[in-house]
Amino acid sequence: MNYYELQITIGSFDEWHDILVAYLAELDYESFVEETPILKAYIQEAYYDGQKLQTLLKEMNEKGAPIATFELALLPQQNWNATWEAQFEPVIINDNLRIVAPFHTLAPTDGIEIKILPKMSFGTGHHQTTHLICENMLALELQGKKVLDMGAGTGVLAILAERLGAAQIDAIEIEEWSAENILENIALNGSNHITAIHGGAPEIPSEGYEVILANINKNVLLDQLPVYGRVIAQQGLLMLSGFFVTDAPDLIAAAARVGFEWVRTDARENWAVVLLKKIP
């Protein structure tokens, strides 16, 4: 499988790079590397659409984004893997959790350590949304709980849920190669209570989930909220992320229409995580 590498040079990088990442993700760009002032984005060759990219860059310029240059190059898969591994740095969250790759050599930790094979799947902990959900999960009581991880990416949230005591976790991922990566990471971490499922909301295998984690984009979340409302247990917790702080009110309102009440909203660099509870 070949990938395109898109390199975009951005002025006011700190202000604009997260916004550009969000819009590129909606065009099926899967992974991102930040080398200020350059943002590198990667997309499968089959999914690349030059016209959509041109339209996006034009719209960004109209919004005031100072995009100076962009370059596109086709990378064979083996080159991509080497590039991604070279950029993969350990992620430390509140000194209680670290997300590392198998090739990292670190001192022992008293906290939780999760190993992730960096195979381009979204969810290594580097992005603000994954970091936010992980941080919030550390404060939840998951012992013995039944958990659903939607848009599981690498499976890092499912693995963390198991480490925090969850008894059963279904990890659903729509991209086949990501679903395969989940299986690798389950084995790498010795996880025994996670079922990896290739598919979307129609493949949710059961009901009565006590916690649902969904780190996807806003439009997918809005579409799937009624499904979450059907498969979650009463008083169950729903944690949403993958969107900007300004989008949180729309998602909270939509969730209220299918029986959820708002608990709290947290933010990290303009990205949000929303925690909700299912009520009768």
Image: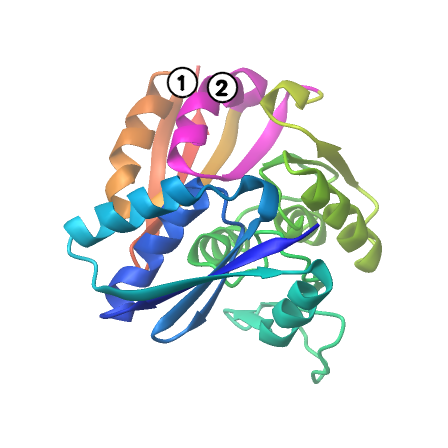
* Amino acid found under the numbered disc labelled 1: Gly
**Quadrant of image for the C terminus:** top left
Residue 257, percent from left and from top: 34, 16
On the question of residue 204 being in view, the answer is yes
| Label 2 residue SS | helix
Residue found 33% across the figure and 62% down from its top: 17
Give the vertical position of 124 relative to 193 (above or below). Answer: below
Mark 1 = which residue? 259
> Residue 223 appears in which quarter of the rendering?
top left
* Amino acid found under the numbered disc labelled 2: Gly
Residue 29, percent from left and from top: 50, 49
Residue found 70% across the figure and 69% down from its top: 101
Query: Which one is in front, 66 or 72?
Result: 72
Residue 90, percent from left and from top: 60, 73
Q: Residues within 10 Å of mark 2 (few under 14, many from 20)?
A: many
On the question of residue 273 being in view, the answer is no
